[in-house]
Every structure is written in C-alpha cells, then in structure tokens.
C-alpha cells in the first residue's frame, strides 16, 4: 500500500494545466493544418480522428508530466529521509558512545566504591571481632568472678542458715533444760514468792522457746516435737495462748470435739501463737482478742478477732503474700516481720489456709482453715479404776486435801498467787475474777493469821508428800493422810494401769481444765492427795500452768499484789509445756523400760 504523500510534497495543479493547454494548442494547430491540407471529402473524418488523437496526446503529455513531477518529489523525499536517517544514526552513535563512556565511568566508580566498602567492612569487622573477643574475655572473667562470688555467697548463706539452725536447736535444748530445771525448782520450793518468780521465768523461757522455734522454721530445721497421738483443739488453743505475753487478753470461744494429728499439732499451735501474738501486740493494752472455732465440711476454721489497728490495702497484700507460703527465701525479712513468714511456712507445710478480713470489732480478723487431712476426733479418756491406798500421816490435823481447798476457796486462785482456771475459762478471765474477789477480800494485815494457817497447811502437804516418797522405797506405795471426808474422796475414779510407786497422770479432759466442779492440776496433786497417793515427779516438758495452781492456793500475805504469770500450756521440745493429757502418755510405763519416762528432749524424742 502506497503511503499518502504529504501536503507539501504533492505536485502543483497549475503547471499541469499549463502543460495540458500547451499540448492542446499544439494538437489543435496540427489538426487544423491537417484538415486544411486534406481533400474536402475526408476532412470531416480526419478532423474527428485528429481531434481524438490530439485529446489523447494532451492527456498523455499531462500524465507524463505529472509522473515526472511525482517521481522528482519522491526522490527528494527519499533523499531527505536518507539524510534524516543518517543524522539519526549519527546521533545514535554519539549517544551510544556517550552512554558507553558514562557506563564505563559508573562501572569504574562502582567497582572502586565496592572495593573501598569491602576494605572498610573488612577493617570494621576485624576491629569489631577484636573488640568482641576482648569484651567476651572480660565478660567471661566477670562471669567467673561473679560465679565464684555467688558460690561463696551460697556457701556462706548455707553455712549461716546451718549455724542459725544449729543455734536454734541449741536454744531449744537450753530452753528445754531450763524449763525442766524450773519445774524441778517449783516442786522443791513452797514459798509463794519464789514460786511466782519461777513461774514468771518459766513463761519467759517458753516465749524464748517460741522464738527459737520460729528461727528453726525459717531455716528449715526441725521445730518442736512430734506427738504420738492427736491433741484436742482446746489444748491447741490454750497451748498457743501460753506462748504469748498477752495471754490474759485472749478470750476463747471453742466448743469443738476435733483434735489435731500429732505430727501437725506443734505446727498448728505455733502458727496460732504467732497470730495471737500479732493480734495482742497491735491492739490497745486494754482490748481483748477473741478466738472462735467453727467446724465446716472442709475442716475447722479458727478465727482471731481483735479491735486494734486496721490494716491498709498495701499492708493487707503484704500480709497475705507472707502467709501464702509462696515466698520461701529469707531475703526481705526483717525482725518485725518474722511472725507472718513463720505462719506462711507452717501453713504451706501442713496445708492450712490463712486469710485476712476486717473485723467486726474494729480491727483485723484472721481466718485459719485447718484441713481435714490433719484433723481427727479427740482421743477418749482412759477407763478409770478405783485405787484407795492410804498411810497414816504425821500431822493429820493440819493437812487439808487440795481438792477441798479448791472447792471452798474462790476459783480464781488465792490473792496474789497464780490464777486457777476452770473448764471453759481462760487465765485472763480467772485473773479478772481474782482481782474482783481481791477487792472484796479482807486486807492483808487483817487476814495475816488465816494466810499463815493456809501456808502452814501447804507446808504440811509438802512434807507429807516427801515423807510418802521416802517411804515408797520400802512399801512400793505412796500414801498421804486421809482427811475426814476421805471416803468421799476415795470415790473419785483413777486412770487404769497405775504405775507402782508413782501416781498416774490425769486423762486429757481432766488435765486441761479439771472437772466441772473443781480444778485439778496437771499431775493431779489434789486427786492423788485425796486418795492418799503422792503425785509423781513430772518429766521435762509437762505443762506447769495448771499443775502449780493447787500449790498456789495458799499464798503468803505479801503475795497479794504479785501479778499472775502463766506457764506454757503447749507441748514442744523447746522448753514449753505439754498439752493436757500428754504427761500421762509420756510417763506411763512401757514394756522396754517400765520405770523410765519417755524423754522430752528434741534429740531423744523421735515419735511421729
């Protein structure tokens, strides 16, 4: 297909018309001359034929002229295109050369830059490698030094904990020995002033033993003793009371028949003692701390309610974190925060749950859930038998059975002496009742004669006990003078399996709070006296809080204003007293050793 020519390249029409007119004029002249010269007969056909030939000739000339002009224009365009192509080819060559130069320049520059960057990277890599090696060597040395320091610190920590545990064990042993010595002194001395001082020392030693137990718990050492039989809940609560200084402000509201398993009794008692101590310390001196016991399907809930300071949210979170038992490290503990940490360790060990809440009394309430795993039914009392041996006394007229004095005298104890606790009453309640009765009692100087008489009767009782003990070596039986109502006293029941030459201990129910009508000390001086028997020497670890109450029934006149000091109610190998009834279990004869009681020293007692 032929390309359309451009408007500027088309041949002009006017020159073609001029050529056509010229050809027509020449043809017309030729035809006119031929016709004029021809004969007349052929002029007509000749004219037409010549005219047609002339027209064809004009057309041919015009077409030829147009073709020539068109060819000339095409050649001109071809030459112009060739020139343009040559120009474009030259420009392309120039651009190609320029691009090649630029490409070469950029390639050279990139190669040079890459070489420079590679060299710089290599230098930086070598520098960083050297620095890393040096830093790693330094860090390795630092890690080694810190590892050695950590190992030394761990060894020192282990040594410190071991030393602390050893010191706690020694403190426990010392407290045990001290309490044993104090009990022996209490049995030897009949002076009420000396007895009150000994009881005060006994109570202080029991608190020191609790502190030693706390240190042992925090260091992971063994604390306290493991009892071979369950301990009643009331004995657990009173044992916890006996380990704190503010025992007089604690009010027990307990009516539970459950008991704590022997392996967990010491831990539960210790935890409750710490909570009671906190409640007493953070309450006003005149405020009371109330303890409630509730049996639930999950176990037993012991709640401690005080009316002291209210814990803030931050303090509450810290206390809950401490008693949760999740934190076992000693770091962060201070001298004022050992109690809750000890409670947390013991709660974790025995599965107890401790929680805090606002108390309805305006202070803080603590709930302790004892799980069923460590609870059982309270042990039943031993089956009693009757035994009424008697021997004549040197001075029957001046010897009065202790149980008669207990029945006749106020239940709160003699003025100035130790308060005597009955079943369901705390020592603090007995102390308040004693103070009330003291206000109504006659003045000391007015009742000096009566006090001296009671002191004389107490001395006669002591001498009769020692005389009966000396005579037991030959008779095998202890006897005391029979009072006028000896027949009535002999009707009292005694535990079975009496030990030859030694009075049997009371069962747990009688030991803890006495009978409903009277209070009997732990090793039954009143009952044994009424039956003509002498109470045997209690082993170390027996509870002195109740076993000296009968002895304190007749204080001297100058002992009226002496504050009562409790003895520790609880068991333990750190010099604390046994729970009620434990004395009988520990002093009964065994098949292997019929005359040697079970030791209460931490190293000698391995029962679990």
Image (cartoon, grey):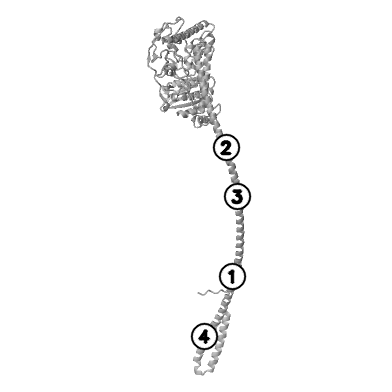
Query: Mark on residue 89?
Result: 1
Residue 423: tell me if it is visible.
no
Residue visible at 39% across and 17% down in the picture: 382
Q: How far apart are marks 1 and 2 (CA)?
A: 80 Å
What percent of the width, then of the height, locates residue 281?
Answer: 54, 23
Query: Mark on residue 34?
Result: none
From the viewer's perspective, is the residue at label 3 or at label 1 nearer?
A: 3
Contact between marks 3 and 4 (CB within 8 A): the answer is: no
- Characterize the local packing of mark 2: few (<14), some (14-19) or many (20 or more) Cα atoms within 10 angstroms: few
Q: Is mark 1 on a helix, strand or loop?
A: helix
Q: What element carries label 2?
A: helix
Which of marks 4 and 3 precedes in the sequence?
Answer: 4
Circle 3 sits on which residue?
126
- Rendering quarter of residue 70: bottom right
What percent of the width, then of the height, locates residue 196?
Answer: 52, 14
Residue visible at 55% across and 74% down in the picture: 5
Residue visible at 55% across and 90% down in the picture: 30
Circle 2 sits on which residue?
146
**In this orientation, which residue lies closer to the viewer: 530 or 514?**
530
Query: Mark on residue 56?
Result: 4
From the viewer's perspective, is the residue at label 4 or at label 2 nearer?
A: 2
Q: Distance between the residues labelled 2 and 3?
A: 29 Å
- Characterize the local packing of mark 4: few (<14), some (14-19) or many (20 or more) Cα atoms within 10 angstroms: some
Q: In this view, does 383 lie to the left or right of 52?
A: left
Which of marks 2 and 4 precedes in the sequence?
Answer: 4
What percent of the width, then of the height, locates residue 472?
Answer: 43, 10
Q: Distance between the residues labelled 1 and 4?
A: 48 Å
Which of marks 1 and 3 precedes in the sequence?
Answer: 1
């Amino acid at each position: 297909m032929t390309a359309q020519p451009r408007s500027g390249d088309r041949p002009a029409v006017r020159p073609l018309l001029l050529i056509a007119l010229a050809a027509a004029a020449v043809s017309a002249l030729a035809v006119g001359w031929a016709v004029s010269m021809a004969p007349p007969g052929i002029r007509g056909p000749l004219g037409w034929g010549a005219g047609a030939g002339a027209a064809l000739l004009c057309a041919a000339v015009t077409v030829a002229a147009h073709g020539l002009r068109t060819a000339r224009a095409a050649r001109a365009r071809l030459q112009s295109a060739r020139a343009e192509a040559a120009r474009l080819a030259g420009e392309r060559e120039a651009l190609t050369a320029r691009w090649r130069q630029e490409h070469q320049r950029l390639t050279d520059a990139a190669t040079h830059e890459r070489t420079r960057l590679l060299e710089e990277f290599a230098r930086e890599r070598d520098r960083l490698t050297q620095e890393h090696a040096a830093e790693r060597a330094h860090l390795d040395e630092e890690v080694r030094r810190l590892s050695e320091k950590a190992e030394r610190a761990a060894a020192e920590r282990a040594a410190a904990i071991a030393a602390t545990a050893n010191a706690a064990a020694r403190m426990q042993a010392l407290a045990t020995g001290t309490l044993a010595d104090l009990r022996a002194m209490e049995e030897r001395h009949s002076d009420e002033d000396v007895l009150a001082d000994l009881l005060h020392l006994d109570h202080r030693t029991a608190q020191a033993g609790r502190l030693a137990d706390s240190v042992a718990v925090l260091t992971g050492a063994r604390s306290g003793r493991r009892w071979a039989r369950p301990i009643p809940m009331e004995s657990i609560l009173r044992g916890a009371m006996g380990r704190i200084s503010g025992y007089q402000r604690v009010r027990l509201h307990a009516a539970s028949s459950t008991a704590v398993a022997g392996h967990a009794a010491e831990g539960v008692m210790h935890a409750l003692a710490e909570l009671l101590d906190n409640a007493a310390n953070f309450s006003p001196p005149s405020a009371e701390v109330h303890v409630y016991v509730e049996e639930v399907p999950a176990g037993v809930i012991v709640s401690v309610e005080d009316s002291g300071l209210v814990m803030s949210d931050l303090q509450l979170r810290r206390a809950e974190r401490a008693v949760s038992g999740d934190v076992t490290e000693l770091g962060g503990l201070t001298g004022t925060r050992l109690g809750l940490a000890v409670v947390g360790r013991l709660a974790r060990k025995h599965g107890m749950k401790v929680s805090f809440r606002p108390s309805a009394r305006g202070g803080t309430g603590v709930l302790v859930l004892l799980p069923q795993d460590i609870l059982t039914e309270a042990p039943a009392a031993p089956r009693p038998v009757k035994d009424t041996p008697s021997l004549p006394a040197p001075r029957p007229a001046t010897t009065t059975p202790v149980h008669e004095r207990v029945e006749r005298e106020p239940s709160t104890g003699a003025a100035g002496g130790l308060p005597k606790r009955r079943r369901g009453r705390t020592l603090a309640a007995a102390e308040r009742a004693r103070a009330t009765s003291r206000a109504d009692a006659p003045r000391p100087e007015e009742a000096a004669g009566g006090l001296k008489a009671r002191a004389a009767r107490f001395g006669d009782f002591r001498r009769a006990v020692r005389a009966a003990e000396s005579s037991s070596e030959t008779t095998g039986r202890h006897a005391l003078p029979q009072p006028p109502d000896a027949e009535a006293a002999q009707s009292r029941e005694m535990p079975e399996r009496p030990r030859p030459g030694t009075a049997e201990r009371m069962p747990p129910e009688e030991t803890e709070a006495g009978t409903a009508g009277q209070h009997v000390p732990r090793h039954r001086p009143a009952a044994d006296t009424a039956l003509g028997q002498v109470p045997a020497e209690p082993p170390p670890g027996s509870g002195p809080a109740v076993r000296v109450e009968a002895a304190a029934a007749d204080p001297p006149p100058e002992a009226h204003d002496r504050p009562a000091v409790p003895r520790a109610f609880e068991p333990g190998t750190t010099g604390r007293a046994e729970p009620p009834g434990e004395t009988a279990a520990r002093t009964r004869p065994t098949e292997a050793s019929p005359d040697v009681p079970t030791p209460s020293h931490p190293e000698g007692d391995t029962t679990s």
